[in-house]
Image (cartoon, rainbow, N blue to C red):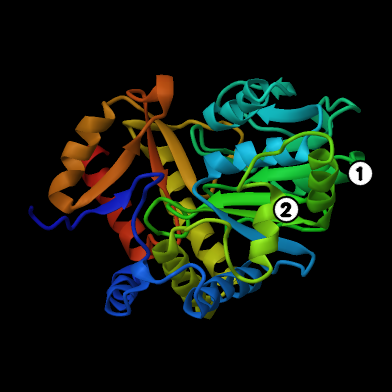
């Protein structure tokens, strides 16, 4: 099979973080994929990944970090463990809607506040009922490129002090600078902004979530291996209930270490500079149109544009230059492109993408 030299601006799986290749070689040399998840070596890998994430995200001590198979699994674990009766969902795209649908499939009462695809929310516009035990917000809707500003997420806590607030930041962390005193849980997948192979989800939760999970588990079953109690009892000794994706946890520990050398502030600033390049081009393009009309709600990490040309044709033009962008999601598959703007994408690479699109399509 021929070597693939493309830079993937796809929204996930996406471009690998530049240092992953060296870390993968180290992992194979050390036979990381075959070490026992009950070994001291794994406990050290787990601890390094957790401490690195705490530093990168500026995470308070009252938050725990759990490793799952995916963010999709995390939806289920949150609902099973932290909801006795009712959850509330701010729905503005395909993934936030699927999270809401999980509640019904688990025979819980899910209540949604839905806006059109490509729109987002202000705290004051959310009609959250008093009976909602968990408020589910999507900071960055991967399907539509609409983002909920962190400032608006923080305002939700001011208005709803008793409910748990959980945030989907699957395609944006570590970009959002959350005030963790205003949220109770956040989760993400590593194949997007962390530039790793798919197959690892990260669930971050505080003591309020843990206490609620204990209450719910006293009333009904909240699962087997993946109850909060089961996962937390192992996490406290740097282990997991079952054999996890050891290789990806190792790679995450290494990439987070690399990111910490750059610093979260510079990662965020670079993301904003790259996003400006892309949005400025789209605003002047003859072939593309920025999809999210309200600038305040435009994602900095998953940029979506309407296209006059089929996404496959766009990628055909980009192929000789070793680049690829993502197609639209769902019903928008042939009508839009999605451009990932993750830490793995350098400013030089984004400049090349923009100049190539401009030269090829105007």
Q: How crowded is mark 2: few (under 14 residues within 10 Å), some or many (20 or more)?
A: some
Residue 92 visible in the displayed image = no
| Whether residue 326 is situated above or below residue 32 in the rendered picture | above
Q: Which quarter of the picture shows residue 101?
A: top right
User: Could you tell whether 323 is left or right of 227 in the image?
Assistant: left
Residue at 86% x, 40% y is 163
Kindly report which numbered mark, 2 or 1, lies closer to the viewer in this rendering: 2
User: Which percent across, then down, holds residue 99?
Assistant: 61, 31
Residue 203 visible in the displayed image = yes
What is the secondary structure assignment of the residue under circle 2? helix
Residue pointed to by mark 1: 161
Q: Quadrant of the C terminus?
A: top left
Residue at 81% x, 43% y is 164
Q: Which mark is residue 201?
A: none
Residue at 31% x, 60% y is 349
Q: Which quarter of the picture shows residue 138?
A: top right
User: Could you tell whether 201 is left or right of 327 in the image?
Assistant: right
User: Which percent across, then down, holds residue 313?
Assistant: 20, 31
Q: Mark 2 or mark 1: which comes first in sequence?
A: 1
User: Which percent across, then down, holds residue 56?
Assistant: 61, 70
User: Could you tell whether 217 is left or right of 159 in the image?
Assistant: left
**Residue toward you, 333 or 222:** 222
Residue pointed to by mark 2: 229
């Amino acid at each position: 099979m021929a070597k693939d030299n493309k830079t993937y601006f796809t929204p996930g799986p996406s471009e690998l973080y530049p240092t992953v290749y060296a870390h993968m070689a180290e992992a194979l040399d050390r036979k990381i994929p075959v070490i026992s998840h009950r070994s001291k070596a794994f406990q050290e890998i787990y601890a390094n990944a957790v401490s690195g994430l705490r530093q990168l995200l500026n995470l308070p001590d009252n938050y725990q970090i759990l490793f799952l198979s995916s963010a999709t699994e995390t939806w289920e674990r949150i609902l099973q463990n932290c909801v006795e009766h009712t959850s509330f969902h701010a729905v503005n795209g395909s993934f936030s809607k699927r999270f809401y649908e999980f509640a019904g499939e688990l025979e819980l009462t899910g209540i949604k506040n839905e806006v059109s695809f490509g729109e987002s929310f202000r705290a004051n516009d959310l009609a959250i009922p008093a009976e909602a035990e968990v408020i589910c917000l999507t900071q960055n809707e991967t399907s539509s490129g609409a983002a909920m500003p962190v400032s608006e997420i923080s305002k939700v806590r001011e208005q709803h002090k008793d409910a748990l607030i959980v945030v989907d930041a699957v395609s944006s962390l570590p970009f959002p600078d959350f005030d963790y005193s205003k949220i109770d849980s956040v989760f993400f997948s590593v194949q997007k902004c962390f530039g790793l192979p798919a197959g690892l989800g990260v669930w971050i939760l505080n003591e309020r979530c843990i206490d609620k999970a204990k209450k719910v588990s006293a009333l009904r079953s909240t699962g087997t291996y993946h109850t909060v109690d089961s996962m937390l009892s192992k996490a406290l000794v740097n282990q997991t209930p079952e054999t996890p994706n050891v290789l990806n946890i190792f790679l995450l520990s290494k990439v987070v270490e690399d990111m910490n050398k750059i610093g979260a502030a510079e990662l965020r600033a670079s993301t904003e500079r790259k996003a400006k390049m892309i949005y400025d081009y789209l605003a002047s393009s003859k072939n593309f149109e920025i999809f999210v009309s309200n600038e305040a709600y435009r994602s900095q990490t998953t940029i979506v544009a309407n296209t006059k040309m089929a996404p496959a044709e766009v990628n055909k033009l980009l192929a000789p230059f070793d680049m690829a962008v993502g197609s639209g999601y769902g019903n928008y598959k042939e009508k839009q492109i999605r451009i990932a703007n993750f830490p793995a994408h350098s400013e030089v690479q984004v400049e090349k993408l923009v100049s190539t699109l401009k030269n090829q399509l105007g």
